[in-house]
Image: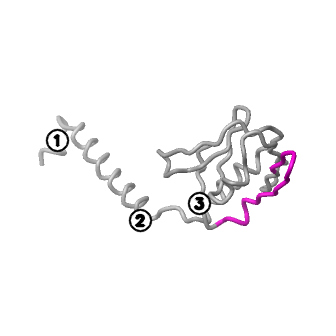
Amino acid sequence: MILFDKKYPPIMFTLMFVVVSIIIFIFFKNNPMSVADMNVLLFKKIRSKSIKSIVTKKSTDYTNHGATYVVYGKDSLPTHTGWDEKIQIGDSIIKSKGSLKLVIQNNSKEDTLDYELNQDEVLSTNF
């Protein structure tokens, strides 16, 4: 057969690459991450942060399914949709390392927002 001839190793390599790519594509398409798995990644990333800052901006990323964020300093955190009215620009934002609780303070209020209480809404891990 001409494909196995020594003159045509690039064809075999290309054919093998295409077959392996198709198998990988089918595997990942049929095995998406669960909400629980996505939350584990999100919580790990949030727990690693220690925050004592001021909210400088609220942002919506329309290229990422309308994901909402609060921006503080040179960093940001994803927020749940129900938190939009609780967080305002200029509020203090406090979170200790290892925690999933976010304390929002200003002169007239203090709210504690907990990522663990909102596990049904999948947040972006791209922050």
What amino acid is found at the position of numbered circle 2 in the picture? Asn
Question: x%, y% of residue 79?
Answer: 66, 52
Distance between the Cα atoms at labels 2 and 3?
Answer: 19 Å
Q: Is residue 34 left or right of residue 53?
A: left
Toward the viewer: 60 or 11? 60
Q: Do tag 2 and tag 1 residues touch (Cβ < 8 Å)?
A: no
* Residue mark closest to the camera, 2 vs 1: 2
Q: Earlier in the sequence, mark 2 or mark 1?
A: 1
Residue at image position (16%, 41%) is: 5
Amino acid bearing label 3: Val
Whole-percent x and y of residue 23? 35, 57
Q: Secondary structure at mark 1?
A: loop
Question: What's the amino acid at mark 1?
Answer: Asp
Helix, strand or loop at label 3? It is loop
* Image x and y of residue 35, in percent: 58, 65
Magenta stretch in the rendered image? 104-119
